[in-house]
Amino acid sequence: MKLLTPERYEEYEKFLWENKKGHFLQSLAWAKVKDMWKNEILIVEDENGKIKGSMSLLIRKVPIFPLTIMYAPRGPVCDIYDKDTIKELVEGAKELAKKHKSYVLKIDPDVEASDEKFCSMMSDLGFKFNKSKNFEGVQPRFVFRKTMTGMSEDEVLASFENKTRYNVRVAIRKGVTCRIGTREDLPAFCKVMMDTGVRDGFIPRSLEYFEKMYDEMGDKLRLYLIYNGEKLLSGAVAILYGNKVWYLYGASSNEDRNLMPNYLMQWEMMKWAVENNCDIYDFRGVSGDLNKGQPLYGLYRFKKGFTGDFVEFVGALDYVFNPFMYFFIEKGERAYRELRRRLFLRKNKDLLPDKVRETANEKATYTKESADE
């Protein structure tokens, strides 16, 4: 196990890009986006000195206590059944935990919950599994993904459910348009994001955060904006990395929803994935509760219309360094997040039109997706 040094940055990015478990959240650019966290990157080499495993760690101080949390979003990156490599990475994290006074290492790997071999191995290594059905984790445990390896645009469009394909065409027929935004468009996007946050019960990111993301991710990021004439109806941030495109953040106005802008928006982002010969388009989070009566079912139904796979990840795995402090800090963190969300909704409830306020209040009983909090 070694720490990544600047002279190997190019090799590291190439390893991430080409590895099937590579993820933009493990990239050097993302560590710069999260500049309020310290960053340490562990690597493991093969017999030829090439990187065969890695784990980018984000490290942040815990309020009040002289301790830190250590988090590897969608890490580690390696052969997920290579127990020796993962063990080396964990041992490296243990050493860094002493340096940074970390009470826990949190990971949420891109591995499906049905993978019993991986789950058994991680239990043997001492990880604690956390289960949730909605958006309680940092990364969503349940996502909707569409495999599109080798598919053309026509083939992807033809694969949609009839109603979804019809709604995409409705948006186009009614003159709804899409354009790729610039940094100067971020304030308008954030305004729509505020509407969405209040309506759906989550705290939106700040303009400064999106500006930082736009600057650091470069051409791997696109801002999609959907218009009716000059009126901005919806927008999204998408990320291209390796063989995938992720729909990372989305926002939609409370107006003109009958024009189906969000259907066109998803289609345009999927076309980007086709252009780059991606294997997967990731719609990101859905609820794990697929009961039609629960408030987030509509989100699942919308994404399902594009066809694809409902994927359950193993979720958050914690390697606890300090069991006593882990118990108190984890409970306090959950309570703090919920209080912060409720105060936000109370402060901004007047932004909602009357016709959607009742539905929004019902949805607010759930914690909505917020990528990499």
Image (tube, rainbow, N blue to C red):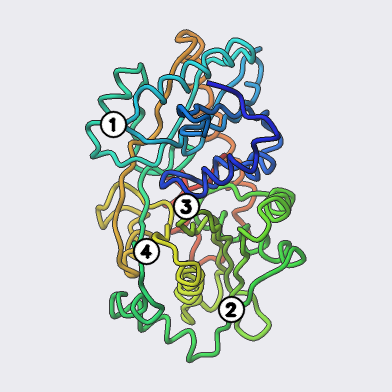
Task: Quadrant for residue 221, please give it.
Answer: bottom right
| Residue to which mark 1 is pinned | 118
Screen quadrant of the C terminus? top right
Residue at image point 72% right, 67% down: 182
Q: Number of labelled discs?
A: 4
Estimate the spatial distance between the alpha carbons at disc 3 and disc 2, rounded to whole Å. Answer: 31 Å
Can you tell which of label 2 and label 1 is closer to the viewer?
1
| Residue to which mark 2 is pinned | 178
Indicate the secondary structure of the residue bearing disc 4. Answer: helix
Estimate the spatial distance between the alpha carbons at disc 4 and disc 1, rounded to whole Å. Answer: 28 Å
Indicate the secondary structure of the residue bearing disc 3. Answer: helix
Q: Earlier in the sequence, mark 2 or mark 1?
A: 1
User: Mark 4 Cα within 10 Å, few/some/many (few <14, many 20+)?
Assistant: many
Q: Position of residue 202 (x, y in %)?
A: 54, 48
On screen, residue 254 versus residue 315, left or right, reads right
Estimate the spatial distance between the alpha carbons at disc 3 and disc 1, rounded to whole Å. Answer: 39 Å
Indicate the secondary structure of the residue bearing disc 1. Answer: helix
Estimate the spatial distance between the alpha carbons at disc 4 and disc 3, rounded to whole Å. Answer: 22 Å
Q: Earlier in the sequence, mark 3 or mark 1?
A: 1
Question: For the residue marked with disc 1, what is the amino acid?
Answer: Phe
Estimate the spatial distance between the alpha carbons at disc 2 and disc 4, rounded to whole Å. Answer: 19 Å
Q: Position of residue 51 (x, y in %)?
A: 51, 34
Q: Earlier in the sequence, mark 2 or mark 4?
A: 2
| Residue to which mark 3 is pinned | 361
User: Mark 3 Cα within 10 Å, few/some/many (few <14, many 20+)?
Assistant: some
| Residue to which mark 4 is pinned | 303
Q: Earlier in the sequence, mark 4 or mark 3?
A: 4
Question: For the residue marked with disc 4, what is the amino acid?
Answer: Lys
Q: Nearer the viewer, residue 100 or 275?
A: 275
Q: Compared with residue 131, is residue 191 higher up or lower down, i.e. above or below?
A: below
Estimate the spatial distance between the alpha carbons at disc 2 and disc 1, rounded to whole Å. Answer: 42 Å
